[in-house]
Amino acid sequence: MPDKRNALVNTALLGLLVLATIISLATGTVQVSLFDTLRALAGNADPITDFVINELRLSRVIAGLLSGAALAMAGCLMQTLARNRLATPGIIGIDNAATAFAVASVVGVGLSLAPSAMALAGAAAATAIAFGLAGANGTRGYRFIVAGIGIGAIAGAVTQVMLSRVAIDAANAAYPWTVGSLNARSGQSVLVLGMGLAAGYLVLMSLSRALNTLQFTDAVAIALGTRLKATRIIGLGLSVMLTGLAVSVCGPVGLIALLAPELARALCRPGKVPLTAAALAGASFMLIADLLGRTLFAPLEIPVGIITAIVGSPYLLWILLRPSPRSLT
Amino acid sequence: MLNALSPTSVVASRAFFPPLLAAGFLLLLVVLASLLYGAGPVSASDAIAALMANGTEEAWFVVTELRLPRTIIALVTGLALGLAGALLQSMTRNPLAEPGLLGVSAGSGFAVALAILLGATTATLTTLVAQLGALAGCALVIAATRVQGLGNDPVRLVLAGATLTGLLLALTSMLMLIDQRAADEIRFWITGSVAGKPLSILWATLPSITLALVLMATVARPLAAMALGEKAAVGLGHHPGRIRFLITLTVALLVGSATALAGPLIFVGLVVPFIARAFSGPDIRKTLWLCVPVGPAVVLGADVVSRLIAAPAEMPLGVVTALIGAPVLLAIVRAGRMPSL
Amino acid sequence: MTCRTHPPKQTLLRSIAVLALSAMGVGASLADTRSVETAYGPVTVNGQPERVVTLYEGALDTTLAVDANPVGAVITRGGSDVADYIKSRAGDIAIVGAPAETNIEAVISVRPDLILAAPRTNEQQYQLLSRIAPVIVSDVPMFQSDSWERETRLFAKALGREEAAEQVIAQVESRIAEVAALVEARIPEAQRDATLVRWMPQGPLVMAEGLFSASILQAVGFRIDDNDLVKEGRPHSEPLSLENLSSMDQSWVFLATLNADGDKALEAARQSPAFARLDAVEHDRVITVSGQLWTSATGPLAVLAILDDIEAAVTAIQP
């Protein structure tokens, strides 16, 4: 039966996520055996191991988990709304705008809000501007995308100017924000992200039927009883919120929003929007990418944004160059 | 062959000459401004005196050895990028197709960054590498248009291109992480600038640009015919596949040369054809003619601005073109004028 | 044996001995535990730490200068290992990260008992590191002429080797006087203006006059003036326009290179006609120096290395 397949896929992905989590926790410059890792999680290990696992690594793993899931869900949403498997929030400049705002806060330009709040503000601002310029067609038309690209470019240029004009220490502190890294996270941002993710997930689950109908043409969707405009607005709003919060934790790791939903769509039964699968896949990808970044050139760390880009590019090119029967529309 | 380009051979339109002349005049003004203004102590009057062979030795040096070379390089860059943009947009029938947005510039940039990392320093090698990178980027973009469903929807193509650009930028970041020493050099190069470039790099790119211009002259008429649809074009005796190949090659040569000269500059290939089309209408040949003065004017104008707003330092040209180009793009979107191709 | 009480004199001597020993013992343990003023308040350090991790080039320099054998260090900015000038002395030291990104696990794995961190280490990082070992974050203001000396004293105090530090500082100061005398003898007053730059094709980056190496140049008699081109707190300016080279047209130009190959950098700079017109170029007063040492390092050993460079440059000129 078709629904069993999705449940199976979700379980498998969950298993993958748990595995990735444990391996991430067990891996690092300090050698900790698997057994000791589990003991530390249970609160039963010596102080050093406890510190390494529960303070250093756990917080990083949780941040990676949550941001990966959020980015993947945002991407999945965006692709459903735009009916295009290549649509990501990053395309309409949200990533860049959130980064620019976060960098501004880190280097001390403008308002002195926390970087995470600023990132969210940036994402919201970009979307609002894009929307405002998009005119009648809203998210479906040309203009939204074009406006988004323009905004992304301006934000990118502004970020560059800011970085080049402030003191070198501030610029160095802001660097992780620009490439996507789990190093610069703050506990508060992670907490807010967690709450946002939970809330978003609940809302989306309740919307899932409506989202599934979006795969058809507008006329069919309306005929099936979907309130198109409301669904689109909520979907877009959630996508923006999730992306903004995720960027405030890990910076612009855009490819997760592209790769995770792709995997989810490849595995799951076609016809349903695989939000849960995408979230699980996204979380796993993030952890695996961070793991690679930490271990490949130890003790130097490669930011997770760069790893995802490098690992993801062959796959992206494959998508671009091979027509797939599963393409949306 | 040249007849295909001659403005008089198209449907007679009195409205065409005035814009062409105006653009040419504007170009002359910008060139003059470029020679007269800069970030340093040599003011406009000093420069004029120098040009009249009446000025100080320093003024003469600044005008002829600093401002003049960069003026010429900026002009050539603008010409190449403007034409490349117009060709790409006509071929893909997508007013948003821009070499910078579609990843062609980023491909060029990545290739050059790689070359810098591996120790390349000569101008010829950099030019060659830039062109190969542009060619690879172009090929990917064109291949993407053939993917089912992608070629028909302009937005999809742009999405694909934007993703590709993001990727290449991340890969370039990775290169900078690997070798911190090359990183500084790459970082400065990749923001795009015409400052401090010797005229020798121009000679290195001249063969490619000449070849590209020749190719362009050959395909201009068939391209105009293709605007009527492929079947019509075939009926008129053209080979669309071959035309597309030639145009791809031309765009790659142009973008590669421009990137080798000034680093990756975005939005130029979008803004210039847009302005040109506003006056020339959908005929690609007229558009190309108008791009000839408009392209250099835009890039050189941006360069002059870059010298003036951050003295005694200079704002990188790449930042200025982004800051100028993006709002123009937004204004276009706002005004609702998306001219069809 | 008959029981005899000790004669009063022996008792007195014994008591005095015991008192003296205990006083010394107390005094010694008091000296062993000291409080060091850091950017995050006073930090208590015991004894002479044996396993020191340095997260700052100046700290590594000082630690090696007072013979306190560090066990972990960060790579130099822009390189892949510790700076060249100090590499042989550092030996087989463990790398625990880059200046901006410390790998905290790597720090843990070398089991330090003292961590010397960089100025402006942020609070979050500081809290994490403090869980491992006492952390000293220098509160000495940067880019001032006596910054390196004060930092050396601060780190030496934390290391419990203040005497050694004073000796090193004295040695450095006498060397400075030596080179200053050389400069005075060989270079006329009017030709002692200098500038420190890094050359990029678009234009030079002028180094701040408060930069460590610039302050050494000034200490030996050169005059450095960055013409207010460098903003507060920045180590160098934006790339100057090539039209503005008059700001760097001093008698001496110290050209900092990114890698060890000074000749290549000079060649690249010579390509630019604006560069060729500089006074210093015409009089062959352009000295290529290692960027790692001159723009990134700090500390007593660095001073000595820079002084060697200066001495070599000054002795090489035709009088």
Image: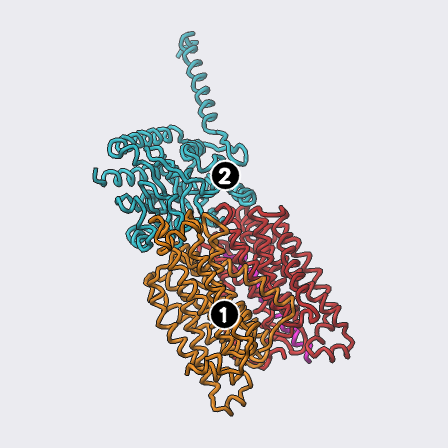
Chain colours: A red, B orange, C cyan
Residue B266 location, x and y as percent?
Answer: 50, 65
Residue A203 location, x and y as percent?
Answer: 73, 64
| Quadrant including the N terminus of chain A | bottom right
- Residue A21 in the magenta stretch? The answer is yes
Element under label 1? helix
Does the image show residue A17? no
Front residue of C302 and C237: C237
The reply, left or right, for residue C41 in relation to residue A74 is: left
Mark 1 packing: few (<14 Cα in 10 Å), some, or many (20+)? few
Mark 2 and mark 1 residues within 8 Å of each other at the beta carbon: no
Q: Tell me where residue B275 sits by quadrant.
A: bottom right
Q: From the viewer's perspective, is residue A269 above or below residue B27?
A: below
Which residue is disc 2 drawn over? Answer: C135
Q: From the viewer's perspective, is residue C17 above or below residue A62?
A: above
Residue beneath the point at 55% across and 85% down? B228
Q: Main secondary structure of the magenta part?
A: helix
| Extent of the magenta region | A1-27
Task: Identify residue type, mark 2.
Answer: Val
Q: Which mark is residue B21?
A: 1
Q: Nearer the viewer, mark 2 or mark 1?
A: 1
Residue beneath the point at 53% across and 71% down? B18
Front residue of B307 and C211: B307
